[in-house]
Image: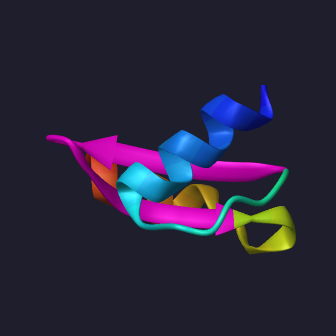
Amino acid sequence: HRAVSSAVAQTLGVTHESPQLLLVQHGRCTYHASHMEIRVDAVKALIGG
């Protein structure tokens, strides 16, 4: 699904990586991280959890 991931990356203005976590809120990417940089605490803070 490389075409889909490339389109998402271009639309959101991020570089595609795998594995990768993108948090999209109201149509914009508010958090993106890959590999060992993915932080649950950061995501929880952004989503109010």
The extreme bottom residue here reads 37
Is residue 49 visible in the rendered image? The answer is no
Q: Is residue 31 above or below residue 1?
A: below
How far across and down, in percent of the image, does residue 36 sit?
85, 70
Q: Give the image's coloring scheme.
A: rainbow
- Furthest residue to the front? 3
Please give left or right for residue 5 compared with residue 43 in the image: right
Quadrant where the N terminus lies? top right
5 or 40: nearer the viewer = 5
The prevailing secondary structure element of the residues shown in magenta is strand
Q: Where does the magenta region start and end?
A: 19-33
- Can you say whether 32 is above or below 23 in the image? below
Q: Residue 6's x, y, as percent?
A: 63, 47
> Picture quarter containing residue 17?
bottom right
Q: Position of residue 29 (x, y in %)?
A: 34, 56
Q: Residue at x 41, y 66 (%)?
A: 13
Quarter holding the C terminus is top left
x then y, percent, for residue 20: 72, 52
Q: Is residue 47 left or right of residue 27?
A: right
User: Is 47 left, or right, of 7 in this rendering?
Assistant: left
Is residue 45 or residue 25 the one in the foreground? 25
On the question of residue 8 being in view, the answer is yes
Count of number-bearing discs: 0
Q: Is residue 11 magenta?
A: no
Q: Residue at x 38, y 51 (%)?
A: 11
Residue at the far top: name it. Answer: 1
- Residue at left offset 23%, top offset 44%: 25
